[in-house]
Image (spheres, rainbow, N blue to C red):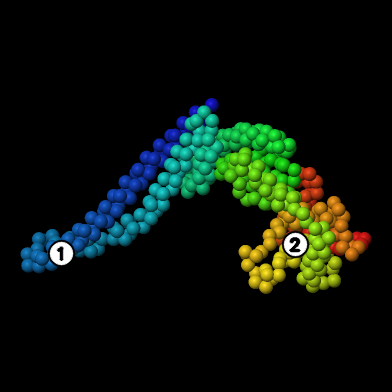
Amino acid sequence: MPNESLIGALDRLRETYTQRQRMTNSLLAALKGTTSALGKASRTLKDYTEQHADEQPSGLTNAQQVFGASRLKDEAIDPLLPELRRESKAQAALITALKEALAGLRGEIVDVVKLGRAYQALQTVKVQDAALNALMPEIEQELQQAQRALADTFGHALRNALAEMGIEIGGRPPRFEIGRFEINADFVNRGASISYGKNLVAKRVPLSIEGLIKAYQREAKLIMGRNEDAGRWMEQFYTAWQSARRRRDGADQRANIVDCYYEQVLLRQARTFHAAPSKHSFIDYSRAQFAHDFYEFANQQRRDYKGLHIFAHVATKSQAESADKSIWIVEGDGPHVGRYFADVVFSKDE
């Protein structure tokens, strides 16, 4: 059922600001008219004086002095106009947001998109109002309830669609889990993002059942459905590790995993790219693909290169907070089963 008390309060607030905007715009028009009238009067007075040089009314000289000394435009009108324009613009933004909030609340079911946009706009509107501030928590509560209801409905439909394909879905709306992937739904903006573990792979996907499933299948194939040569990957990673370790300019056997990833991306490029780098000839190798391959070959298959195995060191808190210092490696069946790793070494026995 619609929240009538909230709707009534928002409607009264909208009417208040509609009246205030009318008054502001009326004052703007009056001041602009005054400026125009003063300018026109001054010019006409000057023309009149020039044409009646011999016969002038007794008060003309005094009128010229008063008009010439008047600072009404410079000292009163011109400084006030910009403030009034800003006020009118802010009032217009607030009224628009209030109208959209009312439109989102008045239906039998709350329109999440309209109310969400309105809530975001009301948070940024440049108007300080105690009555509005008092209503914001209630608007947020209505939005959260509507989002939860929509998320449950959407999640049920997504779960059924995936079940028909033999795929199980987990997580809690608006965050859904499909194996090692996480889908984060944004109902206000009608989009969703997809991550492999904590590595973002699709920034924005249209929020539809079919669109999400296709995007998930595409990313799953790109990351987990490749035929990567394990021996070649280990050789490349060893070379990348050596290059990254030398960049540290020390005798430490550790190398940062992100530096290794960067070096390996370069090693995977064709000769034509090294000769003439171009985005058209660049062979993509995403962080998610690297994270998958790293765990697969270094942990699952426990591959070696010339008798040496890869040993990874868990990232510190500060390293885990930096994308250029660590990479999240999925180590289980879910996106949150894993750890951030920062450094790696090759060794027979660590």
Question: Which residue is labeled 1 in the image?
Answer: 47
The residue under the point 82% across, 58% down is 230
Which quadrant is the C terminus positioned in? Answer: bottom right
The residue carrying pointer 1 sits among few (fewer than 14), some (14 to 19) or many (20 or more) residues within 10 Å by Cα, namely: few
The residue positioned farthest toward the left in the image shown: 55
How many numbered tags mark residues here?
2
Please, what secondary structure does the residue beneath circle 1 have?
Answer: helix
Type of amino acid under label 2: Tyr
The residue carrying pointer 2 sits among few (fewer than 14), some (14 to 19) or many (20 or more) residues within 10 Å by Cα, namely: many
Within the image, what quadrant is residue 79 found in? bottom left
Question: Which numbered disc, 1 or 2, marks the residue that appears first in the sequence?
Answer: 1
Question: Which residue is labeled 2 in the image?
Answer: 261
Which quadrant is the N terminus positioned in? Answer: top right
Q: Position of residue 347 (x, y in %)?
A: 89, 63
Rendered position, 289 above or below 131: below
Type of amino acid under label 1: Asp
* Residue 201: mark: none
Q: Calculate the distance from the C-alpha at mark 1 to the C-alpha at mark 2.
A: 81 Å
- Left or right: where does residue 303 sit relative to residue 152? right
Within the image, what quadrant is residue 169 found in? top right
Considering depth in this image, is 216 or 136 the residue closer to the camera? 216
Q: Is any atom of residue 325 visible in this view?
A: yes
Q: Position of residue 160 (x, y in %)?
A: 68, 33
Q: Position of residue 62 (x, y in %)?
A: 17, 62
